[in-house]
Amino acid sequence: MKIEKDIPLPQRKGRCGKFSEIIEAMEEGDSVFVDTFKDAVALSNSIARKHPLGKGAVRAQRDGGYRVWRIS
């Protein structure tokens, strides 16, 4: 093993999986309906990763499914 200096860290691709296009189109206050809790959590986490200081909120819906808001 060898220590190397001055090797730049590559930039991330900026993709957020299957939600990348929807996250790009979302503005603060927009929401998306998803069928599963797993997708709701994944979308909320992707919002947080994609937007600086980003945050998503998840709420269960009475008629089933989940809604995810981009709140910042």
Image: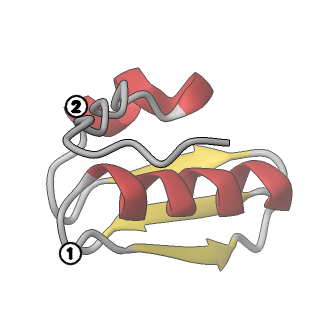
Residue 59 position within the rendered picture, expressed as x and y whole percent measured from the top left: 62, 78
Q: Is residue 28 left or right of residue 46?
A: left
Task: State the residue at coordinates (28%, 46%).
Answer: 5
- The answer to whether residue 65 is seen in the rendering is yes
Q: Amino acid at mark 2?
A: Ala
> In the rendered structure, which amino acid carries the disc numbered 1?
Leu
Q: CA distance from mark 2 to mark 1?
A: 17 Å
Q: Residues within 10 Å of mark 2 (few under 14, many from 20)?
A: few
Please tell me how crowded label 1 is: few (under 14), some (14-19), or many (20+) other residues with Cα within 10 Å.
few
**Residue 52: percent from the left, percent from the top?**
18, 64
Residue for point 79% across, 45% down: 35
The one of 44 and 69 positioned closer to us in this rendering:
44
Measured as percent of width and height from the top left, residue 63 is found at 79, 62
Give the labeled residue for mark 2.
25
- Whole-percent x and y of residue 46? 49, 51
Relative vertical location of residue 25 with respect to residue 42 in this rendering, above or below: above
Which part of the image, by quadrant, shows the C terminus?
bottom left
Indicate which disc residue 12 carries: none
> Which label number is shown at residue 53?
1
